[in-house]
């Protein structure tokens, strides 16, 4: 259904866009609610039929977004193939490690790829692929078929219509602009960018760095330490991005420093909360059970550490987070080792 207030001539996602959001967790639900509040009629695909039925009956996602009543214009279904037959564009909001499976199934069900907006943040463990690389491998060989949506955006604040700004990145400016206008609302501003690689790496890396600042804050290492981790973390994500062909300026934007600041300092962040609890002395296994939702930085720490070794860049904070999470390294020793690294010039070491 067309949003009556939209005068944008959509060229890639259909004159009357019909968005299908893949993923019934907090982000998928929030994006579907947002599109409905913005005047569209989205469909939310929820894998679990019992949860889908419960959401449709109660008009609330009591597991992932409790307390938010879903607008009537939002449909919910567990039937992927049927939902795909009605859609003109897809929004991917599935945890990173499951994207390949879901996109393969989607690709098989579609006669040709629909434009897709990737809202997942992460790097695949088994292949070290980014979201756009997974899309290219199993969804469509044409990079103009997908965009990445990223930026500082807590699900809860988006559905509460708190002012939010994100980025829509695609090599196809028409697709980036269509998504900009689709998601635009008086409380939600979307910028465009071409640098898909930079936007997706920034979104993946900020989760790892939020765990680092969470650990530091959980250990009560102070405000100076948090600021140093954020700043040197930004240098790390930029260094990895530039080595992989990204524009360094992308990391100064909303998906870079914007999302890093949000996630590393905002207590709504699940990644930061994982770090805080680790810093307080809890075990990773118990933290993840208590969280009950995805904290992408936990798996991305392993992928980013391996990716850095593969492409030959040093990411000391990322390596420290990886060793704490996956090699049971001692927190105090690992963090203080960062302080004992060889002295360097900030200029020379940045890129
Ligand atoms: N929650 C936020 O505020 C937010 C904001 C921006 C981006 N993101 C990103 O969105 C992605 C999804 O996160 P989330 O917050 O919705 O996580 P979540 O833990 O709240 O929900 C994940 C959902 O994905 C579903 N899922 C898992 N594997 C699946 C599969 N194989 N097939 C179908 N569904 C599957 C789960 O059932 C669950 O409904 C992550 O990459 C996250 O970083 C989240
Ligand atoms: O709760 P987190 O840490 O997954 O962060 C959510 C979003 O990515 C913030 O932009």
Image (tube, helix red, strand yellow):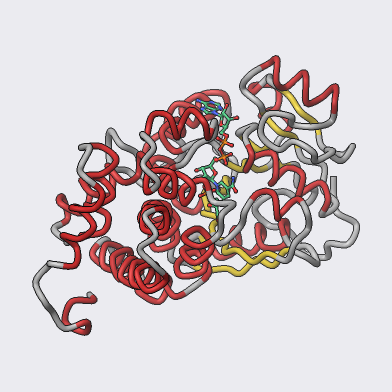
**Quarter of the N terminus within the rendering:** top right
Residue 348 percent across, percent down from the top left: 16, 82
Quadrant of res 190: bottom right
Residue 69 percent across, percent down from the top left: 84, 38
- Rendered view: 117 above or below 222: above
- Rendered view: 38 above or below 262: above
Residue at coordinates 57% horizontally, 61% vertically from top-left? 152
Residue 340 percent across, percent down from the top left: 13, 67
- Rendered view: 204 above or below 168: above
Residue at coordinates 64% horizontally, 23% vertically from top-left? 80
Please indicate, yes or no, whether residue 133 appears anywhere in the rendered image. no
Quadrant of res 162: bottom right
Using residue 70 as the reference point, say whether residue 237 is left or right of it: left
Q: Nearer the viewer, residue 95 or 38?
A: 95
**Quarter of the C terminus within the rendering:** bottom left
Please indicate, yes or no, whether residue 265 appears anywhere in the rendered image. yes
The residue lying furthest to the left in this view is 342
Residue 86 percent across, percent down from the top left: 74, 31
Residue at coordinates 11% horizontally, 77% vertically from top-left? 343
The residue lying furthest to the top in this view is 50
Using residue 299 as the reference point, say whether residue 151 is left or right of it: right
- Rendered view: 338 above or below 303: below
Instruction: Report the number of discs.
Output: 0
Residue at coordinates 69% horizontally, 41% vertically from top-left? 88
Q: Nearer the viewer, residue 64 or 14?
A: 64
């Amino acid at each position: 259904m067309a949003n009556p207030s939209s005068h944008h001539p959509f060229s890639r996602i259909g004159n009357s866009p019909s968005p299908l959001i893949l993923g019934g967790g907090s982000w998928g639900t929030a994006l579907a609610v947002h599109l409905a509040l913005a005047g569209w009629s989205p469909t939310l695909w929820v894998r679990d039929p019992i949860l889908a039925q419960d959401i449709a009956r109660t008009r609330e996602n009591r597991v992932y977004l409790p307390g938010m009543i879903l607008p009537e214009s939002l449909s919910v279904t567990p039937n992927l193939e049927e939902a795909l037959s009605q859609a003109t564009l897809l929004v991917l909001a599935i945890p990173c490690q499951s994207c390949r499976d879901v996109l393969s199934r989607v690709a098989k069900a579609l006669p040709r790829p629909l434009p897709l907006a990737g809202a997942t943040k992460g790097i695949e463990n088994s292949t070290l692929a980014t979201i756009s690389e997974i899309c290219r491998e199993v969804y469509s060989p044409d990079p103009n078929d997908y965009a990445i949506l990223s930026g500082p955006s807590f699900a809860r604040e988006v559905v509460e219509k708190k002012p939010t700004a994100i980025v829509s990145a695609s090599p196809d400016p028409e697709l980036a602009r269509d998504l900009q206008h689709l998601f635009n609302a008086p409380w939600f501003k979307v910028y465009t960018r071409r640098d898909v690689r930079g936007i997706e790496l920034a979104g993946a890396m900020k989760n790892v760095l939020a765990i680092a600042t969470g650990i530091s804050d959980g250990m009560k290492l102070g405000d100076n330490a948090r600021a140093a981790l954020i700043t040197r973390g930004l240098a790390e994500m930029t260094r990895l991005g530039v080595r992989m062909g990204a524009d360094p300026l992308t990391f100064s934007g909303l998906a870079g420093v914007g999302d890093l600041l949000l996630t590393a300092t905002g207590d709504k962040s699940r990644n930061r909360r994982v770090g805080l609890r680790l810093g307080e002395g809890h075990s990773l296994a118990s933290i993840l059970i208590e969280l009950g939702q995805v904290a992408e930085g936990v798996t991305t720490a392993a992928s980013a550490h391996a990716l850095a070794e593969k492409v030959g860049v040093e990411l000391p904070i990322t390596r420290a987070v990886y060793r704490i999470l996956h090699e049971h390294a001692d927190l105090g020793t690992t963090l203080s080792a960062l302080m004992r690294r060889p002295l360097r010039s900030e200029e020379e070491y940045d890129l």
